[in-house]
Amino acid sequence: MGFLSVVIVNNFVFTKFLGTCPYLGVSGRLDTAFGMGLAVTFVTALSGITTWLIDFYVLVPLGLEITRYICYIVVIAGMVQLVEMYVKKFFPPLYKSFGIFLPLISTNCVILGLCLFINIWGTDNLLEVAVLSTGTGVGFAVAICIMAAIRENLILADVPESFKGAPITLITAGLLTLAFMGFTGMIK
Amino acid sequence: MAVENSGKVNYLDALTAGLWRENPTFRLLIGMCPPLAVTTAVKPALTMGLSVIFVMVCSNIAISLMRNLLKPHLRIIMFTLSIATFVTICDIYLRAFQPVMSKILGAYVPLIIVNCLIIFRAEACASKTNVCASILDALGSGVGFTIALCIIAGIREILASGTFAGVAVMPRGFVPWAVLSMPAGAFITLGLLLGLVSLLTRKRR
């Protein structure tokens, strides 16, 4: 239930506006969007679990909550570096097609946002954290793939001259959000 | 860019570029989370804008001072670490002196750390120019960003609840447009504003 909740009902992109930059920026083509979604899912799952462990077993017992944001950022940057090295070693063509976007995942709001919300929600069980982290990543992947698929068809549409590009993308995102609002309140 | 090819720094240009020509929200489309997330009312939008100005000025100073020590592959992590430090300061200040705003903004204050706008300014300006130009650049972009936030928040607050910064401005019998206070309204308002901006800039050309 928690999984479905963060994927569909409380999707981070649609309800909390996290990860809007890649959502609008990288969603031009479906295959890039899919790869980006997978990479983000992986990083989100790993860093969500790691930051929760660090928070629960190191920061809180030692009373170091004040350094929380800095620790989170270091963990996320480390995870992104790990993914980058892995993809570079085992999937060189994929690495080439990502280009600059891979290191930029570390500044993706979804990941830091998830770490912070896990903290705000006060989750105190590792399994729940793992499910929520993976679900958030999958939710982001779903959102960016839907958006990319719509935008591939939007090229054929007759859009007013001044609305071409970013404005129409934002309005599309608005309508998509409206559609997802239909799920509000179904779970928790 | 504030830095010209000859290496000379144009201070006035650094200050004014962010206001309209390189306005982060309307022209460059970076740092898009806050303009969508905190603009249901004017007050939180203004608080967010001021926090971003503070963090950006401080981090631009810090990065500009250490620009000659940066190694290329460690650049981004150094940027985010110095930004995270100032965001922590800002968060603690808000929690102590503006508890209401701190509660409304919630997780969006720590999320300033990953605001693309601040990292972009650090990369494009502070890591290349001296301290003085970096401060002016941060002020310009920050004020431009704050104005953009307030415009969006103003439109959404007036139409969605008939108030501006908490004061009722619409006549009695006004039916609030509830959708504008919801996430969908944020996307559509910003989309229409961007369309307007591109219409205006096209005419001028």
Image (cartoon, grey):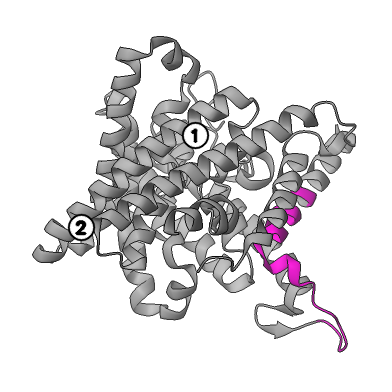
- Between A139 and B195, the one lying in front of the other is A139
Amino acid carrying mark 1 in the image:
Gly
Residue A37: numbered disc: 1
**Residue at the spot x=33%, y=24% of the render?**
A84
Q: CA distance from mark 2 to mark 1?
A: 26 Å
Q: Earlier in the sequence, mark 2 or mark 1?
A: 1
Chain on which label 2 sits: A
Please tell me whether residue B187 belongs to the stretch shown in magenta.
yes
Tell me where residue A163 appears, x and y as whole percent.
83, 39
Q: Are marks 2 and 1 in contact (CB under 8 Å)?
A: no
Q: Name the residue: 36% across, 74% down.
A: B95
* Magenta-highlighted residues: B170-192
Q: Which mark is residue A55?
A: 2
Residue A171 colored in magenta in the image: no
User: Quick one: SS at disc 1?
Assistant: helix
- Name the dominant secondary structure of the magenta segment: helix
**Secondary structure beneath label 2:** helix
Specify the label residue B41 is tagged with: none
